[in-house]
Image (cartoon, rainbow, N blue to C red):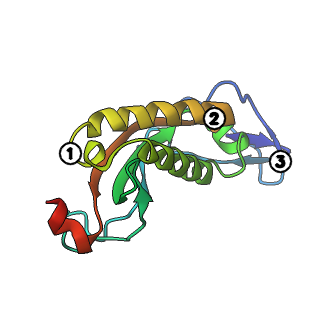
Amino acid sequence: LLQRFGDVVNPDAPWQPGLHLKGPWPMDTVQRFDAQRVRSLSVGNITDDPTVPLIWTRRHGSDEPFVSGDNHFVYPYIVVHYRISDVYRYAYGAVEPERLLEDTALQIVTAAFASRTFYALSLSGRDELGADLAAQLTAELGVYDTGIEVVDVVVTDVHPPRDVAGSFE
């Protein structure tokens, strides 16, 4: 984004590769965003080492409990992949778009887990759950005008508390 005296120059169309001129610092400033890079955000629990298998009876990350629809504590490991779709809306639409993404994703995941049983969450339908979460998150972010595009939501693991994991297995 090129800003001239604090106003964005040509906010409707992004700058294309090539030669561009800008004035000295007090007159023009440039903000650069890598809009092609896909970023990741962990929702729920965060794994310590992503190369270690997620085994229910071992500690492998943070322990943030969620409640399933059948009143079991569950520990989800979910990753949201996203990228910047509109640089102008990303910079000027919401105050903190990535924080808004994190809070919105947490709210949607909490509601989705509260409406499903533990076995439905952990054994089958993870791809379907990820697609549902991605669709809801995309719709919600469109309301907030964040300039963020949700690429994919991956449900990596959902497991019970370690103390009772053996009983669930």
The disc label shown at residue 27, or none: 3
- Relative to 24, is 1 above or below? above
* Position above or below: 15 against 3: above
The x, y position of residue 133, in whole percent, is: 43, 37
Quarter of the image with the N terminus in it: top right
* Residue 57, quarter of picture: bottom left
Q: Determine if residue 104 is in view.
A: yes
Relative placement, left or right, of 99 versus 129 is right
Q: Is 91 positioned to the left or the right of 167 in the image? A: right
Q: Position of residue 164 (x, y in %)?
A: 23, 70
Q: Mark 1: give few (<14), some (14-19) or many (20+) Cα within 10 Å.
A: few
Q: In terms of sequence position, does the residue under pointer 2 or pointer 1 come before the other? A: 2
Q: Position of residue 28 (x, y in %)?
A: 77, 46
Image check: 52 left or right of 159?
left
Q: Which quarter shows the C terminus?
A: bottom left
Q: Which mark is residue 20?
A: 2
Residue 127 occupies which quadrant of the picture?
top left
Do labels 1 and 3 touch, CB within 8 Å? no
Q: Which residue is mark 1?
A: 123
